[in-house]
Amino acid sequence: MVSPDFWRRRRVLLTGHTGFKGCWTRVVLERLGAKVTGLSLAADTPSLHGLLGGGDDAAVDIRDRAAVRAAVDAAEPEVILHLAAQALVRASFDRPFETMETNIAGSLNLLEAVHAGGGDPAILMITSDKVYRNRNTGQFFTEDDALDGEDPYSASKAACEIAVHAAARACRLRVATARAGNVIGGGDFAADRLIPDIVRAVQSQSGLKLRHPEATRPWQHVLDIIFGYLIYAERLGQPGLPPALNFGPGAEGLTVREVITLMEAALGQTVPWQVVPSDDKPERTRLELDVALSRSVLGFDNALSQDDAIRWAGDWYRRYLTGEPATRVTHDQLDTYIKDYRRG
């Protein structure tokens, strides 16, 4: 269980706080009473950050060493959750060097700032389930499997893993990496992600274009993964804690086709779609994670099944699209999640 006493009045530096996952993380941390400082680029439009009222944190590019150092010094963090990234696989083909610089050099800028400042915060670096050497066999990857990356995004995250662990050992920093992906929930408006693409197709009454309707992914709700991250961060520095952990549903993923069917039911709308030819941006169609280690070490498991995660996401968008304020829907879902699943 997440410890409210641990987080109450805890100084937390949250990078990427204007993104979908970062915004939900901030909502949870503030509910727990943490003192959160955000470090991120300005939010896109539309964004959950904007819908929830934004904030007065300064916009900082994680690639700017001096600005990152100043932000870390000012925040004096006790915990750092590093979510800032160029997080879109397909965009990485168009912007490979920016992706590498953001995800590798940006992460090292953060660690350098901590080391130079002399503090000893617990640092959780969020990477990806795509860091593994994936031969498309349906293998459930464990934390000891080989890292690799055929596309720029995956390569940047695998390289980030290697680099930050080497830097942490050299500088004696308390660093761990969390590997997860296919995180879904309300308030995600990013391009080339299935759930937002479905919602946009409903809004525009246009057909959804799919390249791989039978592709499988380990879908998980954003609240589940955030609570997993927080439990991991609480334990950093404990003897024997693994330096990297997988987070996911631990079951075979659902296909894109199955996700669409569940979203149609949640939205109360039919989503027309068609298969289009694959382009020159290759994607693996199968990806699964073995989460036995995070279950055994942290005692953590996702509370929501993959089906329920999709239903919760669909319900958020249904309520938002029918005029309910995003703030109310977001906090209602957090209230229900804590009351029904995470209250000890």
Image (cartoon, grey):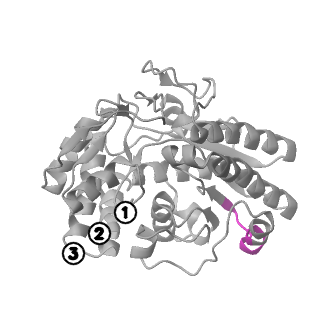
Residue at x 82%, y 40% (from the top left corner):
169
Front residue of 99 and 318: 99
Mark drawn on residue 158: none
> Marks 3 and 2, how far apart in space?
10 Å
Asked if residue 161 is positioned above or below residue 203 in the image, the reply reads above
Give the amino acid at mark 3.
Gly
Q: Is mark 3 on a helix, strand or loop?
A: loop
Give the amino acid at mark 2.
Val
Question: Reading the chain from its start, which is encountered first: label 1 or label 2?
Answer: 1
What residue is shown with label 2? 329
Can I make out residue 104 in this image? yes
Instruction: State left or right for residue 35 relative to residue 25.
Output: right
Residue at x 40%, y 29% (from the top left corner):
285
Question: Reading the chain from its start, which is encountered first: label 3 or label 2?
Answer: 3
Neighbours of disc 3 within 10 Å: few (<14), some (14-19), many (20+): few
Front residue of 147 and 167: 147
Going by the picture, which residue comes out furthest to the top? 137
Q: Comparing marks 1 and 2, which lies closer to the viewer?
A: 1
What residue is shown with label 1? 187
Mark drawn on residue 323: 3
Q: Start and end of the magenta stretch?
A: 71-79
